Amino acid sequence: MLRRLTLGFAGVLAAAVSIVACSSSDATQTISVGPNFPPQTLYAADVTQNAINIYSPNPKSTAGPQYQIGGGSTTLSGPQYLTFDSNNDLFVTNWVQSSDSGSLLEFQALATGNVLPYQTYIYSGVRPRGIASTPFTFAAGSSAGNLLAVAVTDPSQPSGYQSLIELFEANALSIVYETIGGPGTGINVASGLAFDAKSNLYVANLQGKSVEVFAIAPTPSPTPSTSPTASPTVTPSPTPTPVGATPTPVPTTTPLALTPTATISGAATELGEPTGIAVDSSTNIYVADQASTVCAPACPAILIFAAGSNGNVAPKAIAGSNTLLAAPTDVKVDPSGNIYVADTAAGSGVVYVYSKGSTGNVAPSATLKSPGALVGIGLVP
């Protein structure tokens, strides 16, 4: 069963009191708000520096990050994947292998520097990785919000299907609306996640060499039922203000054994080790794969499947020596069709940018530098 502890807004503040006055360098902590980051600003999870790198839109090749979220107060530790809600708040999964501990953190839009998380959800013995967000209406007559999907691996679950997908309401991380899991899902170590415009969920099935697609019900219900929790008003202020009572831990939900509506798998798919996934505005599917069979015996590649792909279907691919790909971990596509890929070779992180429609052994149009190894990337909506 999942073992978790939720810290509400008051809990986050209380936990940070001892470090709010000083940073790791014993200097007074600087809590800052960045500029009004425009749409398509690129964020990248830097696992070496325990930070989030922020790049300006359309950066020049070899550019580094202009801003960073990092420092002791952020509690970032082993950042994995990231996503944004409709308010441009940032959500980041963390997992530290040595301690087998993880967390889900929310940072307010425009935050930079050594800032406090706005919400914190702590895992113990459970390994969170991929995360995705989609606009969502949670019950009839309720206002629209955002649904978060988080891929976790729970070693306490039966062998063969230890990966689960947890669904959260973004403004109340104490509430797990549903947990998707079980042998019927076809998931065997989920990695990257993505939603399309219709809230279909795409899962990069790392050890299953597949992509699984799920139709998420429009009005999930909490199991067991929970009492409403007051939500804070989101503002660009760098200091979170608690509103309402501190949420208490919610009993574990029984995994929902959803059957995929589509499964991309088989020799023709060239899938080997899919780590990250993205869906563009035309519902084409992009998969970052570290050991694709598109070249023999295997090579790093970005596999591109046509909208509606299902079964043992062949993709187009970005692969070959000119691409510079070494170990791609995530992929995103902007509204103009440009393709962004997080890649790490010999401990040095980069983001490669490929022009719209790129396939084959094509060179990136830009290469963005990172001070550390990268995992997940995201673009401000």
Image (tube, grey):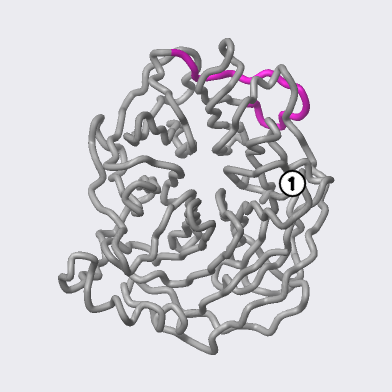
Task: Find residue 324 and report its image quarter.
Answer: top left
Residue at far bottom of view: 245
Residue at far left of view: 27
| Image height of 100 relative to 19, above or below | above
- For the residue pair 157 and 58, the one nearer the viewer reads as 157
Label 1 environment density (alpha carbons within 10 Å; few <14, some 14–19, many ≥20):
some
> Residue 264: image x %, image y %?
72, 30
Task: Find residue 282 and report its image quarter.
Answer: top right
* 300 with respect to 305 (left or right): left
Residue that appears at 46% across and 65% down: 106
Identified by mark 1, the residue type is Phe
Give the prevailing secondary structure in the magenta stretch. loop
> Residue 77: image x %, image y %?
41, 58
> Residue 18: image x %, image y %?
31, 80
Residue that appears at 69% across and 47% down: 200
| Image height of 236 relative to 125, above or below | below
* 208 with respect to 349 (left or right): right
* Residue stretch rendered in magenta on the structure: 305-320
What SS does tag 1 mark? strand
Question: Is residue 198 located in the magenta-colored stretch of the structure?
Answer: no
| Image height of 194 relative to 333, above or below | below
Task: Find residue 128 and report its image quarter.
Answer: bottom right
Q: Which residue is mark 1?
A: 214
> Residue 213: image x %, image y %?
72, 41
Residue that appears at 75% across and 55% down: 157
- For the residue pair 218 and 372, the one nearer the viewer reads as 372
